[in-house]
Amino acid sequence: DYVSRHRFLRSDQLTLIVAGSRQHLIRRLGRLYHAGLLDRPRYQLQLPESSGAIVYCLTERGRKELRARHMPVFPAPPRTRNAATALRLAHDLRVSDVLVCLQRACLLGDWFFFHHHDWQTLLTGTKPDALYTLKWSTKPRLKDKRQRVTVIPDAAFALHDGDEGAAYFLLEVDRGTMPVTRSDPSQTSFVRKVQAYRESRKAGVLWKRWEVPGFRVLVVTESRKRMESLQHATSKCFRRGRSTMFLFAVADDLLAVADPLTAPWQNCMGEPAVLVSKPATESQPSQSLPGIMA
């Protein structure tokens, strides 16, 4: 189920969020691989930042097995045999790095982690029927003209305090390949993303579809210089250059801190920020609460 939801996970990432013996987990992954339920994308050998841990993803046979067990799955397993995999695998694993880091902090602390697939669990208490890619369309004003933009976050999740409070987040992992801005607003750029997220919140898109009352966008970059460039561009999109809607962090700093829920985030003005600050109640819910193992 973990591998299915994240699409791609390394064995060392799994050991951070799955309780029990590391060696037992490694052996179990090997058995699932040889049984044809998990695959090892061959393009992982081309990753320059490879940690030595093996990357796993779900196969079609594994997807059918989960469906037979009445567990939600994506319509199809991830592609692992084409050139697109080589281009996206490093990005997808960085997304998993961030999610696993935050999920582990919740497991060790007082918060519950819900993938966007489980948002209906927060609202109705029912489990999702299927996993899906979160996306929507909006029409921000770009250079005095409204243009339709499709928004597809790299990930989305909620942090729940076990009582009644939940904070919703959309994740953008920036690998430095997208231009910060362009002269032609119809072309993709980071600034166009910022404007699309602003318009989405203003129009209440997530509220109308998923009853999400509000959200913040987390931007994780690979260097401090790149982060500062994105912060500057973001601040220019808001009146007086101030907003707390977007929070920024450098990936290596985020993965190294003891509590990634409170550090090392900054808003677009470079001021320190936290994801959550309200402590959970003394009476904690059971760790089997739906979504905590998502």
Image: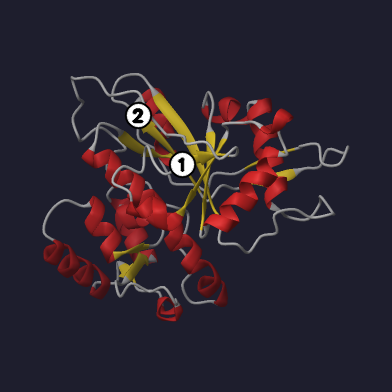
Closest to the observer: 5 or 216? 216
Identity, as a three-letter code, of the amino acid under mark 1 = Trp
Q: Quadrant of residue 21?
A: bottom left
Q: Position of residue 209 (x, y in %)?
A: 57, 30
**Image quadrant containing the C terminus:** top left
Secondary structure of the residue carrying numbered label 2 = strand
Specify the label residue 128 is tagged with: none
Q: Where is residue 283 in the image (x, y as percent from the top left)?
A: 18, 20
* Residue behind mark 2: 160
Closest to the observer: 233 or 121? 233
Residue at the spot x=63%, y=29% of the render?
201
- Give the class, few, some or many, for how many residues have Cα within 10 Å of label 1's Cα (few <14, many ≥20): many
Q: Which residue lies furthest to the right in this view?
A: 144
Secondary structure of the residue carrying numbered label 1 = loop
Q: Where is residue 80 in the image (x, y as percent from the top left)?
A: 46, 72
Foreground mark, 1 or 2?
A: 1
Relative horizontal placement of residue 107, taking residue 100 as reference (left or right): left
Q: Is residue 97 above or below residue 169?
A: below
Q: Position of residue 37 (x, y in %)?
A: 30, 66
Identity, as a three-letter code, of the amino acid under mark 2 = His
Relative horizontal placement of residue 148, taking residue 137 as reference (left or right): right
Q: Are marks 1 and 2 in contact (CB under 8 Å)?
A: no
Can residue 7 be seen here? The reply is yes
Residue at the spot x=42%, y=30% of the render?
120
* Residue behind mark 1: 265
Mark 1 to mark 2 CA distance (whole Å):
19 Å
| Lower position in the chain sequence, tag 1 or tag 2 | 2
Can residue 294 be seen here? The reply is no
